[in-house]
Image (cartoon, rainbow, N blue to C red):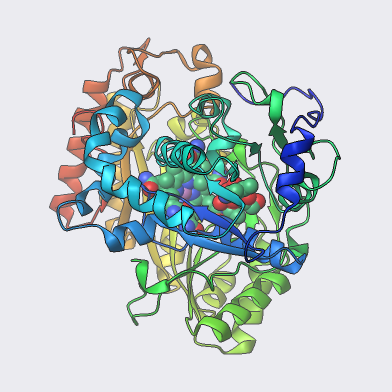
């Protein structure tokens, strides 16, 4: 279930002795932030800790960042590297599978632990995702065993999910940060060396219980944040490259989403929708371009077209600046993007838009809670493509209530628009994501989760209309076959999620 309880601020419960220890200056006075211990994607440098690094530096906290996921990959042998294959994802999420692979990943665990212990930092912050949570817990426990004086802080997306926080055994961590941490982390670091109570968004001490719930913190004005600082990362470690050879850098132009799709939890975690101003985003692009010499930017936004006025202004600023910048991002296929806006976006360097179409059936899109007055996938795809912007599409099959007829409409949609689709970015069967409306209220969607583990239940759910995992998989294979026949690439598919 979703976090949220208004249980107020936690009381400080680190002992006086702990606080005095925390107050001691680190050997070089610095903190280390780690994303993302292994295992996770190697596409882009981790923007969460890059953002926090910039915030801490701007507030006078000495800080450094290390991406152990990317570093471990660079250090891994050829036989270990397949561990980063996205098909292995369940090995790191599922408790049983994780304990089975522990012997295999010992060298990587040792590498990460030693690397952290060798840093002269008293406070170590881990950025947790569901794919590195169990690994991070192992590393943190080893660090605590070797040097109990280190203070371990966990933050990141997994800390926002009560179900995933429960995977953290007590005693592993000194403080948990829930939600946006631009304010709470500096406050936490200050609180550690004073006797003030736990800041908002922080759980520590006696409150670190598995069932503790806390509202996620939200940074209301993203324009006041310093730009992400990637200077501690080796940018050659990241694999997402522009065709010019430039390394893509991530940019977050907004957080949250204007839509509330039933299968999605992103709008739940990151709400409310908060766009930055076009001026602020443009200033970041120019700053990063001059600093890192790369003109390729990956917008991490859930949608770049939540506010068409901001998008239009950003395109104008980019066109006027005439810098060699190219950018890509995700968007909703809204029907009210004018030809002149799309043409200007193309001139501004927008090279590709990934549209979340999901189904070719308007009936299913309405069941998904996609606003039919706003969404017009066919029009959006065609006009975007005509403007000279590449189009990618996300599709999913088997949404509860999807009939053979609805599925045929998806196939027909792809066929009809194949000349305007450059890529199918992802195809997968519908998952019941934690905290999505589908998970919170399955009966509204006539869905019955099945299976022993949470992951099985997310994948193997049954619909009262007879929808099964097998049926969804069969539809997915049929869609994949059509894409092959049409010669449309579909690099990310989840055909073997449970079987592989
Ligand atoms: C764009 C995106 C990507 C992109 C780009 C990521 C990047 N490196 O820039 C790509 C496709 C590469 C990607 C990869 C992955 N992603 Co992703 N991604 C997103 C998306 C859409 C936006 C992320 C973003 O830019 N957020 C803005 C930044 C500033 O926020 P943030 O990272 O959360 O950091 C803030 C807080 O979490 C906190 N924080 C973060 N770290 C720490 C550490 C400490 C110590 C503290 C105190 C606080 C703290 O403070 C930060 C500032 O407020 C989100 C969806 C969403 N709702 O946000 C999913 C999302 C974050 N991704 C997710 C996942 C699982 C992954 C992968 C693990 C997938 C994989 N199979 O490898 C990898 C991890 C890769 C990585 N190294 O970052 C999940 C995480 C869910 C979970 N419970 O784990 C999300 C929520 C999607 C979802 N709904 O499932 N992702
Ligand atoms: S699926 Fe995309 S458009 Fe829909 S709510 Fe989620 S992020 Fe927004």
- Expressed as whole percent of the image width and height from the top left, the position of residue 159 reads 58, 36
Which residue corresponds to the image point at 56% horizontal and 28% vertical from the top-left? 171
The image quarter containing residue 178 is top right
The N terminus: image quadrant: top right
Q: Is residue 472 left or right of residue 351?
A: left
| Above or below 40: residue 433 | above
Which residue corresponds to the image point at 63% horizontal and 36% vertical from the top-left? 174
The C terminus: image quadrant: top left
Numbered marks: total: 0
Which residue corresponds to the image point at 27% horizontal and 35% vertical from the top-left? 102
What residue occupies the far right of the structure in this picture?
Answer: 196
The image quarter containing residue 386 is bottom left
Which residue corresponds to the image point at 61% horizontal and 67% vertical from the top-left? 228
- Expressed as whole percent of the image width and height from the top left, the position of residue 396 reads 35, 37
Q: Is residue 420 left or right of residue 317?
A: left
- Is residue 380 visible in the rendered image? The answer is no
- Expressed as whole percent of the image width and height from the top left, the position of residue 419 reads 28, 62
| Above or below 44: residue 98 | above
Q: Is residue 450 left or right of residue 215?
A: left
Nearest the camera: 430 or 118? 118
- Expressed as whole percent of the image width and height from the top left, the position of residue 384 reads 45, 65
| Above or below 405: residue 152 | below
Nearest the camera: 199 or 429? 199
- Is residue 441 visible in the rendered image? The answer is yes
Nearest the camera: 289 or 391? 289
Nearest the camera: 382 or 15? 15
């Amino acid at each position: 279930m979703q976090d949220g309880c208004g249980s107020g601020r936690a009381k400080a419960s680190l002992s006086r002795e702990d606080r005095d220890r925390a107050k001691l200056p680190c050997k070089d006075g610095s903190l280390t932030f780690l994303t993302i211990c292994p295992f996770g994607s190697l596409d882009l440098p981790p923007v969460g800790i890059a953002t926090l690094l910039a915030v801490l530096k701007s507030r006078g906290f000495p800080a450094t960042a290390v991406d152990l996921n990317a570093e471990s990959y660079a250090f891994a042998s050829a036989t270990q590297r397949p561990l980063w294959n996205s098909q292995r994802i369940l090995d790191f999420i599922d408790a049983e599978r994780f304990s089975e692979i522990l012997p295999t990943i010992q060298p990587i665990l040792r590498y990460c632990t030693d690397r952290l212990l060798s840093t002269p930092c008293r406070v170590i912050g881990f950025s947790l995702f569901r794919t590195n949570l169990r690994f991070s817990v192992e590393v943190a426990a080893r660090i605590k065993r070797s040097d109990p004086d280190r203070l371990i802080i966990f933050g990141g997306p997994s800390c926002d999910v009560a179900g995933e926080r429960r995977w953290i055994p007590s005693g592993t961590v000194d403080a948990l940060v829930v939600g946006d941490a631009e304010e709470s982390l500096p406050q936490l670091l200050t609180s550690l060396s004073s006797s003030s109570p736990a800041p908002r968004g922080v759980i520590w001490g006696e409150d670190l219980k598995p069932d503790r719930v806390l509202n996620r913190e939200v940074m209301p004005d993203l324009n006041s944040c310093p730009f992400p600082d990637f200077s501690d990362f080796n940018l050659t470690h990241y694999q997402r490259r522009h065709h010019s050879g430039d390394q893509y850098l991530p940019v977050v132009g907004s957080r949250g989403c204007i839509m509330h799709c039933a299968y999605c939890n992103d709008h739940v975690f990151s709400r409310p929708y908060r766009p930055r101003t076009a001026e602020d985003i443009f200033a970041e692009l120019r700053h990063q371009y001059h600093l890192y010499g790369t003109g390729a930017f990956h917008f991490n936004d859930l949608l770049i077209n939540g506010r068409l006025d901001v998008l239009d202004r950003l395109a104008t600023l980019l066109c006027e600046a005439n810098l060699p910048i190219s950018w890509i991002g995700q968007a909703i296929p809204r029907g009210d993007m004018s030809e002149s806006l799309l043409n200007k976006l193309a001139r501004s360097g927008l090279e590709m838009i990934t549209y979340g179409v999901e189904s070719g059936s308007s009936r299913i899109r309405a069941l998904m809670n996609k606003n039919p007055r706003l969404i017009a996938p066919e029009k959006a795809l065609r006009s975007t493509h005509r403007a000279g912007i590449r189009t990618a599409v996300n599709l999913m099959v088997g949404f509860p209530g999807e009939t053979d007829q609805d599925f045929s409409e998806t196939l027909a949609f792809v066929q009809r628009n194949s000349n305007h689709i450059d890529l199918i970015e992802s195809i997968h069967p519908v998952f019941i994501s934690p905290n999505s409306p589908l998970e919170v209220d399955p009966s509204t969607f006539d869905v019955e989760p099945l299976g022993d583990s949470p992951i099985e239940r997310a994948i193997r759910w049954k619909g009262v209309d007879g929808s099964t995992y097998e049926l969804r998989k069969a539809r997915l294979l049929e869609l994949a076959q059509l894409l092959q026949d049409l010669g449309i690439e579909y690099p990310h598919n989840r055909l073997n999620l449970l079987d592989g």
